[in-house]
Image (spheres, rainbow, N blue to C red):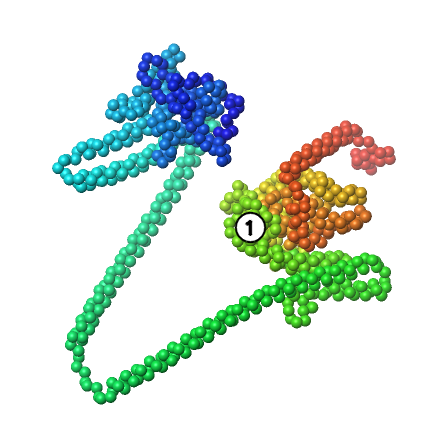
Amino acid sequence: MEGAQEDPAESSSSVPRFAEPAGSARGAEVLPPEESGAAPKKLCGYLSKFGGKGPIRGWKSRWFFYDEKKCHLYYSRTAQDANPLDSIDLSTAVFDCKADAEEGTFEIKTANRIITLKAATKQVMLYWLQQLQMKRWEFYNSPPAPPAAPDAALAGNGPALRLELGKDPADSPKPTPKSSLTANLIQKAKRQNNTFPFFADGLTRSRTAQEKVLALEQQVLMLTKELKSQKELVRILHKALEAAQQEKRATSAYLASAGEKDRLELVRHKVRQIAELGRQLEALEQERDSLVQTASLREQQVQELQQHVQLLMDKNQAKQQVICKLSEKVTQDFTHPPTQPPMPPGAADRDLLSQQEKMEQLKDDMEAYRTQNRFLNSEIHQVTKIWRRVAEKERALLMKCAYLQAKNCQVESKYLAGLRRLQEAMGGEATECSELLRQLIQEALQWEAGEASADGVELSPISEYDEYGFLTVPNYEMEDLKLLAKIQALEVHSHHLLAHEAVERPLRERWAALSDLAPSVELKQLLRAGVPREHRPRVWRWLVHLRVQHLQSPGRYQELLSRGQVREHPAARQIELDLHRTFPSNKHFTCPTSNFPDKLRRVLLAFSWQNPTIGYCQGLNRLAAIALLVLEEEESAFWCLVAIVETIMPADYYSKTLTSSQVDQRVLQDLLLEKLPRLMAHLGQHRVDLSFITFNWFLVVFADSLISNILLRVWDAFLYEGTKVVFRYALAIFKYNEEEILRLQDGLEIYQYLRFFTKTICNSQKLMNIAFNDMNPFPMKQLRQLRTAHRERLEAELHELERLKAEYLETRNSQDPAVPEGCTSEDEGEGGP
C-alpha cells in the first residue's frame, strides 16, 4: 500500500537524484527529446499514482525516474526529493492499458502487486509505455553502454522510441524490429482510421446520396466487425504475453537456483503443472463428450418435436376441411331450407308456453341461489369473527394458565424450601414433629403437578428428561439434596413459563427472520441471548465452519477413521475407560440401545489422529459429547471439537502440562479480586482455593456444572466470541451466588456448597445480564496482558522447579549409597547359605 511507504526516511534505497528537465512543471509529463546535438535526457516526469488506505484512496501526483543499471522505476513526491518513496522492478513487469479505462490510465503488473498510473493525455501514456517496454528490452538484450559515451545507447534507438504527436503515421520513421506490440497496434489503428477518407473519395459522383449513405453504412459495419476481431486479438495477445512472462519468471528462477536440488524442485513443479493441465484437458474432453451427447439428445428431441408439429399441422388441416364442409352445408341450408312437414294447429303455441314456464322456473331457482349465497357469506363472516375471538381468548387463557403454573411452581418451591429449613433446624431429633416433617417431605417429593389437575386441564408437569436427554431433577442420593433438586426443577420450570411469552417468543421470531448468517453486532446479541433449539444445529455448524474452514478438507474425517482401523492408537485404552463415565445422567449415553457411545468413540479416536501432540486428554470426551447432542452428526461433532481445541482455546490448554489452563486460573483470580473484592476477602479469610472448583469449568466449558438450558446458551456465545465468554460466566456465577457464599462461615461448609452451587442457578436471563452487563468493562486487551504476565511467572516457576529437581538428583547420585547398621546389602544376602 502506498500509505505505508510515503515516508522518504523509511526508504532504504539510495538512488541518485535526477535533475528535472527544463520546462517541466508540476503535473506535466516529460516528452521525448528532439534529435539534436545535445545529450538525450533520462526517462523522468510527473505521473498520477493511485494509492492510499481505506476511504482516502485516490490519485496522487508523483515524480517518476528510471534507473538503467537496476531496471527500476523510482518515484518520489517531487523532483527535488533526495530519497525516493519506493521503486518498481521493471525486469519482470507487464504493462497493460485497457480500452474501457479512464483516458491516460495504464497498469504495471509485477509479481507482488499492480501499480495503476495515469498520464495527462493518451499520447503521453503511449510514450511512457513505449519507453518502458524499450528499457525493459534493452536491460535483457542490449550490452551495457561504455561510460565514455553515455548517449550511444539512446541515440541508436531514438527514432523507434520517439512518438511524434499530431503527425500522420505515414510520415513517421519505420519501426525497428524491437518495436513494441502497443506501437504496432496504434499504427494499425491509425491506418484503419485513414480508410474513411479513402473510401469516401472512391465514391463516384454519379451515385445518388442514398447510395452513398448505404455504402457508408456497409463500411461502418465492416469496420465494426474488424474492430471486434482486433479487440479479440488484443485479448489473446495479452494472455500470450502474461503466459510468456510467467514462463520467463520460471526460467529465471531455474537459472538463478544455486543448487541442483532447487532446480530439480523447479522441474518437478513444472511437471506437476503439466500433469494438472493434462487433468484439466481430460476434464474438458469429458465435458465436451457430455456436451456432444447432450446435443445429440437435443437433436433427437427437436426431431420428435418436429414430427409432433407435423402431426398437429395435419390434424389442423383435417379440421379445416371439416369446418369448410360444415360451413358450406350451413350456407346451403340458409339459402335452400329443407322442406318440413306442416305442424298441426296449436302445437307452436304449446311449445312457446312450455318454454316460458321453464324460464320462470329457472329465474326462481336463480333468485333462491342468490339468497342462499348471501346467507352463507354472512354466516362465514360471523363464524370467522367468532373464531378469532375464541382464538384470542384461548391465547389469553393459555398465558394466564402459564402464569398460574409458574406461580404454583414458585409456591411449591417455597413450601419445599421451608420444609428443608425445618429439617435443617430440627437436625436428627426423633420427635413426632420430625416424623411428620419426614412424611411431608416424602409426599412433596412424590407429588407431581399433573396430579393436581382435577378438571382435566394439562398443567405441563415436569418431565424426567429435558430435550437433550439430561435429567430435569438431578439424582442426588442424600435426602436433603433430593429436596434441593426438586426445588431447583420447580424454579427452572417457573422461569421457563414466565419467560416463554415475554422473552422466548420474540427471540424465536428474530431468529426466524434472520435468513443469512454473517458476523455482525446483531448476531452477537442474538447468540448471547441464546439460540432456539430448532435453529441451534444450523447455527453451530456455521460457527464451527467459520473457525476451521482453513483446516477442513473433503474426506478428512473418514481418512482419520481408516487410520484407526489399520493400527490402534496409544490413547484408545484411555478413551474406552472414559467413554462410560461421560454424562451418567444423560439417557443418550446410559441407554444400552443408544448409538451415541459408539459415535463418541469414533470422534475421539479421529481427533487423537488429527492432533498427535495432544492425542487424548480427560475432558475432551465431554466436549465432544455436547457437540454430538446438538449436532448429532459425527463429522460435525469432530470438527466442533477441533474448533474448540485448536482455534478457540489457547495453545497447551490440553497438553500434558496444562500450562495455559493453569495460567487462566491465575487470570481468573485477578479478575475476581477486581470485580468481587468482598467475596475474595471472605474466601481468603477461610483459605478457600477456588481453582479446585473452577479448573474443571474452563477445561470442559461448564459441561458438568450448569444445567443444560443455561449450558447451551453459554456455548452459543462461546463458539462465536471465544474464551472471553468463559471468564464472563465464571465471574457471573460467583456474583449470582455471592450473598449465599458470604453467609457461610466455615471453610469445609463453603467447599461443600461450591461442589453443587452451580446447579442451583435457574434464571438464565439474570445470569446472562450479569455476565454481559454487570461485569463490564471487560476488554480483551486486559485479558491478553494478564495471560502474558502470568505465563512468564509460571514458566519461571517451572524452570526453577526443574533446576531444583536436577540438583537433587545430582546430589543423590554423587553420594555413596549407605547401608543402615544391622541390614545386609543385596549382594551379601545372595552370598549367604
Q: Judge by depth and name the residue closer to the eye, 6 or 600.
A: 6
Q: Residue furthest top?
A: 148
Q: How many marks?
A: 1
The answer to whether residue 740 shows anywhere in this view is: yes
Residue 472: image quadrant is bottom right
Secondary structure of the residue carrying numbered label 1? helix
Location of the C terminus by quadrant is top right
Residue at the spot x=34%, y=18% of the render?
33
Q: Position of residue 81 (x, y in %)?
A: 48, 20
| 63 in relation to 506, above or below | above
The answer to whether residue 71 shows anywhere in this view is: no
Q: Judge by depth and name the residue closer to the eye, 820 or 614.
A: 614
Residue at the spot x=43%, y=23% of the render?
63
Q: Judge by depth and name the residue closer to the eye, 62 or 703.
A: 62
| 333 in relation to 787, above or below | below
Q: Position of residue 800 (x, y in %)?
A: 73, 31
Q: Position of residue 385 (x, y in %)?
A: 53, 69
Q: Position of residue 250 (x, y in %)?
A: 42, 29
Residue at the spot x=79%, y=28% of the render?
815
Q: Which residue is tagged 1?
A: 539
Circle 1 residues within 10 Å: few <14, some 14–19, many ≥20: some
Q: Residue furthest right?
A: 822
State left or right for residue 34 relative to residue 109.
Answer: left
| 312 in relation to 35, above or below | below
| 109 in relation to 16, above or below | below
